[in-house]
Image (cartoon, helix red, strand yellow):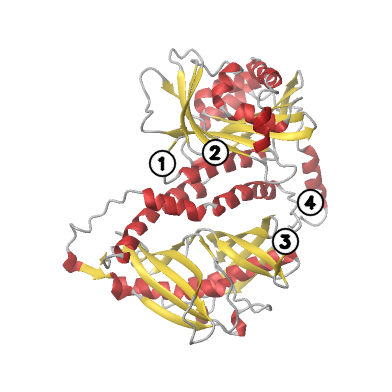
Amino acid sequence: MIQTVGNHLRRGLASVFSNRTSRKSASRTDSDNMADGESYRNPTEVQMSQLVLPCHTNQRGELSIGQLLKWIDATACLSAERHAGCPCVTASMDDIYFEHTISVGQVVNIKAKVNRAFNSSMEVGIQVVSEDLCSEKQWCVCKALATFVAHRELSKVKLKPTVPRTEEEKTEHSVAAERRRMRLVYADTIKDLLANCIIQDDLESRDCSHMVPAEKTRVESVELVLPPHANHQGNTFGGQIMAWMENVATIAASRLCRAHPTLKTIEMFHFRGPSQVGDRLVLKAIVNNAFKHSMEVGVCVEAYRQEAETHRRHINSAFMTFVVLGADDQPQMLPWIRPQPGDGERRYREASARKKIRLDRKYIVSCKQAEMPLSVPWDPSNQVYLSYNNVSSLKMLVAKDNWVLSSESNQVRLYTLEEDKFLSFHMEMLVHVDTAQAFLLLSDLRWRPEWDKHCRSVELVQQVDEDDAIYHVISPALGGDPKPQDFIILASRRKPCDIGEPYVIALRSVTLPTHRETPEYRRGETVCSGFCFWREGDQLTKVSYYNQATPGVLKYVTTNVTGLSSEFYTTFKACEHFLLDNRNDLAPSLQTL
């Protein structure tokens, strides 16, 4: 595929990219100016380097994950406080996948910076790299995203916005809004999925004589919060609580496998309330389920002030996944677990559901765009993450700095971008219509055949929620192919989170069991496309369309890019006429935007 794209580009675009100007040349000039002097560094960036000593390690001579979590939290907190200018507390931590262990004598390099600030909270991105001082080799250990809240004298603080400058910062800043949206609905999403997910287990068919009772793995431990465990306001460090949680979870996992387990994943969790110096923290852990090569341990943290207190405050709950590595560093087989009737069986089945959800989330949210298949199966367990990936992929494409102006005709501009194995194009024009109106008119794909001759018909298959819908699109045959094409498209729309941000309509292919490929049509796919709408003034909108070309339409795309066809311009001008002709039809709907 890469050769195909490269050959097309060399034959068709060699003359196009010569003497063209980038739409972001000004920003690149700024970068060049910075390169002449001191290199640019994000003002919120904090770096920490720690030499791993024997006192930091576990029984295998590897850095304790609990100690690493403390260092991660401290670095992220310093970055957050650098931006906020006041004390900050940990509010939540997204999924963390530990890719490598760290041995004694190696160096841990942690880098943290604020990706985006909202009203009183901010997202901090963290990267952890291990370094072998003798061989000079480095490994990526994990990446993490933490949310911090700024506090001053028991009140929240209104944070100043971050100003992204580099392409990476602009991408993270834009996608942070989508990640925040996912966090806010995370608890309800998990609750709904667990309630509706059909779990197939073989509890009845297993040989109970070879199963470990779950109760044997139960652990309860109490910790007294002392001044070294807290910040200067007396609030317990989130990293310290996470370290205590990792400790009891490791003990519970060890009681099942009778070996030294390795922590591989910590699932997204939120701190439900604060803890202060003088609190007693009760940490409880139990193995919820054991799969073939991994096990899930549930951990709960409660707090109380005085021994006579009967009411305990729920501070946090988390789920951690462990494996047992053999001499060849491969996961070993684990014994089955026998849950207790009632709550134990509920936790057992919920752990199976969470495993599927976790795998879906890691696969869809964490993998790189180039590694994503063109079409991903649509399922209730992954719909939130597919929607996230759909919008964030488009936002990442929009944030690219190296778009090149290829041509301009009738006030419509065509930009191109060659990167990795994708050729992307971007159309842009100004339309005298209200921005929210343009967003509404183009967000329902059923109207698209009125202006796009490449859409013969569009059927709404499923209205997933207010912002997401799935359509079946049929288009005419391309490039001499006798069969027309059809697409199963997920359309995800988003309203701006802040002033100056665009309305977004993101489109990508999905697969549905109810709409399989048929002999009548050739199934087409799109990996990333969609519209962005910027408000340029009263009744004036900049409309931009983006598309990452797949091999099936590459020849058609390069024909237009090289000027051998004007279909792009004709279609985009037809879109402008459609918006102008219908700009007064949805006035009542604007009140909801």
Q: Residue 459: x percent and y percent?
A: 47, 24
Amino acid type of the residue that numbered disc 3 sits on in the rendered structure:
Thr
Earlier sequence position, callout 3 versus callout 4: 4
Q: Could you say whether the residue bearing mark 4 is in a helix, strand or loop?
A: helix
Q: Which mark is residue 35?
A: 4
User: Pointer 1: residues within 10 angstroms few (<14), some, or many (20+)?
Assistant: some
Amino acid type of the residue that numbered disc 1 sits on in the rendered structure:
Asp
Q: Is 481 located above or below residue 491 in the figure? A: above
- Disc 1 versus disc 3: distance between alpha carbons? 39 Å
- Disc 3 versus disc 2: distance between alpha carbons? 36 Å
User: Pointer 2: residues within 10 angstroms few (<14), some, or many (20+)?
Assistant: few
Q: Could you say whether the residue bearing mark 1 is in a helix, strand or loop?
A: loop
Q: Residue 249: x percent and y percent?
A: 41, 72
Q: Locate residue 520 relative to residue 497 in the image: left or right.
A: left
Q: Could you say whether the residue bearing mark 3 is in a helix, strand or loop?
A: loop
- Disc 4 versus disc 2: distance between alpha carbons? 46 Å
| Closer to the eye: label 3 or 4 | 3
> Pointer 2: what residue?
466
Earlier sequence position, callout 3 versus callout 2: 3
Residue 496: image quadrant is top right
Q: Could you say whether the residue bearing mark 2 is in a helix, strand or loop?
A: loop
The residue under the point 54% across, 39% down is 390
Amino acid type of the residue that numbered disc 2 sits on in the rendered structure:
Glu
> Pointer 3: what residue?
44
Residue furthest to the bottom: 307
Amino acid type of the residue that numbered disc 4 sits on in the rendered structure:
Ala
Q: Locate residue 450 relative to residue 261 in the image: left or right.
A: right
Pointer 1 with pointer 4, Cβ within 8 A: no
> Pointer 1: what residue?
379
Pointer 3 with pointer 4, Cβ within 8 A: no
